[in-house]
Amino acid sequence: MIDIQALADEKGIARTYLDATNKLVTISEQSRKNVLEILGYPVDSQDELQKVLDKEAKEPFKNVLDPVLVLNDDDLKQFYIRVPETFGEDENATLTVSFKLEDGRTIERTVALEEVEIADYKDVFGTVYDVRRYFIMSDLPYGYHEAKVTVKGNGKTLKSINMALIRCPSKVYTPDAIKNGKKVWGVSSQLYTVRSHQNWGIGDFADLKQLLLGVNKCGGQFVGLNPMHAGYPANPDEFVVSPYSPSSRNWINIVYISVTSVPELVNCKEAQDLIHSQKFEQTLRSLREKEFVDYRGVINAKLQVLRTIFDHVNVADKRSNRGLKFLDFVERGGQNLLNFATYDAMQQHFYNEGVDAYSWEVFPKEYQDVNSPFVESWRKEHEKDVMFYCYLQFLASEQLADAYKSAKEAGMLIGTYRDLAVGVAKQSCDVWADVDHVFRTKGSVGAPPDPLGPLGQNWGLAPMAPSALKACAYKPMIAMYKANMESCGAIRIDHAAGLFRLWITKTCEPASTGAYVHYDMHDLLGIIALESNRNKCLVIAEDLGTIPVELTKALKAVGAFSYKIFFDERADDGGYIAPQDYTAQAMSALTTHDMPTLVGWWGCYDLSLGTELGIYTQQEADNLRAAREDAKQRILDSLHGLGSISDSYTRNAKESVMNEELATALQIHMCSGSCALFSSQVEDWIGVDKPVNIPGTNTEYPNWRRKLTRDLEDIFVNEHVLDMTSKMTSARE
């Protein structure tokens, strides 16, 4: 009889955890069993489960080597070889170790097998294996290499699989100026919220360039973005727009393309005529004037013009440098890009045919498997449509890179920093195109119950199986980190706790019935460190909430920056911790996209709105309002105590309002702190009161669609903004 709970232990499923109140919580046996099932173990059939476990037990010894080895500078440079004991009985047996380096070079070494230390013995279904420890003698460079071994003895030859050997630094990249104590500020921006005179109703990459240069002129050194991950351009559902539930983390959301910045537009009369038609100009005017982003209206307008360009201009013309550049992009994107473009094109095709094609799961059965010959046949039949979506990715990548390049040329220390979502939705392209079989569609990632969410959270994101990630040598993770560290000087890892463990629940089950599953933090941090140094990309780990102490220590050791939110940093007596007492290795902020704006928080607008939406009962809202009044008084006490605000400003919170003076004082208060990075929000510069997202809501509030209240061109000539940012720069220095 297989002990299910012992198996859950073996597969990294936690028995207990410390909750947000530091209370030890025991996870139920049923929840742990459920998660085993999600990970692919047939727990309700002992016979089927035994077959799976037997196969798993044989695999490492059949392969001789592990599928992957991640070595950082602090690790012992060794790996293990599993060889039948009979080979060791031949005193002339030899071991040949071959390394194929990333740059194409090879290193080979042959030694007597008896010289390789036996570290352990294993009996696997009647065959005894020596587990030998091999020490790597060569000084391997950082990078993605391969190793394989050949063992000869007793007239037999045993060959291993190719093991991915990932050699990485022990620290992520940090700019020298910050290492030497420089403190900088920047802004965090939800790009879709940006208004400008020229955009088409949503902030775009042309706006991003303008925003970067505007922040730079004011003394800022970075602009942090919402996740740029690809969405679902064919899906008409206005609620499927969250940047944190993407279709792919490897590709870019095409809604941010600045159509008027596309080089091919100049030579396309048909597209020019369309844009300048009276009807189209009226459409754009309407899209710009709307209070909330009309994603469907924006994407329809952009796709109409971009498809016109694509149909009338030979964008893949091999006779032009531009055409060669596009074809090179497609070649470098490889099968991953083709699969992604196929998914977008196929989804649009089925919607055009009247199918509610919101997910690959509702495609005709023959198209639900990316490896199906029917998919390849469809791709060939609709080659032009597939290449159109490749072209859109080419434009998006090019424009994001151009904005970053402009910022760096202007002298920004960091420039753009990108936000990495914790996962992808079940209906995503990444799940459909999962050639490495790492996603588990029976489960969902989320969070356990806590005081702020008594029922827990279910985010609808498909989890990856830790064992499957190792089996494919982390290929999906490597591709994802490579993609997201391009065209930026920093990356923010959302819910960084996922590097250590994720809360996984059965799909459609309450979040409270989930369990924590552990991942190999050592390996993931190693890959992040390698890509961080290669791309000169600083790493910010969103470590808010309940973070295991093991992860906190590991993130600090690897050099990742912590995340400090002012409103969360309170002492035991209820007072606010002075920003000067924050850790230096961190980014601090007053507010985030999941919080009310300063005006909204100070005026308790979020509590009134929460009551209207049914998030709070009137009694709960009244209790929170009373606590808020106390918090406001504590903040004023701190501002006055540290000299961050003029003595002439009231010391009584009940008399205070979030005006320009108080908003500026709070920015100065944070800029005077010890964190190397401080991130402000444009919303708080111009007095926006409405939140951009209300956690726990879906259709109740237009999340991810609220725009800024002023145009970009007007913000950086505003006297208050110029005065505030000047004082912020001085405070940082």
Image: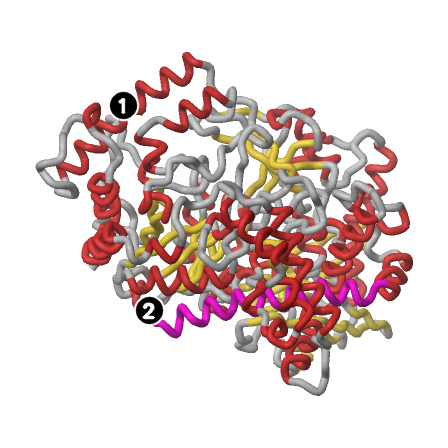
The magenta segment: 382-411
Vertical placement of residue 621 versus 664, above or below = above
Check disc 2 and give the amino acid type.
Asp
The percent position of residue 447, horizontal first and vertical second, equals 55, 33
Check disc 1 and give the amino acid type.
Glu
Of residues 523 and 271, which is closer to you in this image? Answer: 271
Of residues 456 and 220, which is closer to you in this image? Answer: 220
Position of 276 compared to 177: left or right? right
Does any portion of residue 146 appear in the rendered image?
A: yes
The percent position of residue 289, horizontal first and vertical second, equals 49, 46
* Dominant secondary-structure state across the stretch colored magenta: helix
Would you say residue 711 sits in the magenta stretch? no
Of residues 639 and 653, which is closer to you in this image? Answer: 653
The percent position of residue 211, horizontal first and vertical second, equals 40, 59
User: In the current view of this chain or complex, which residue is farthest to the bottom?
Assistant: 319
Kindly identify the residue that appears in the image at 48 percent across and 28 percent down. Answer: 19
Disc 1 target residue:
629
User: Residue 176: which numbered mark, if any?
Assistant: 2
Specify the quadrant that holds the N terminus: top right
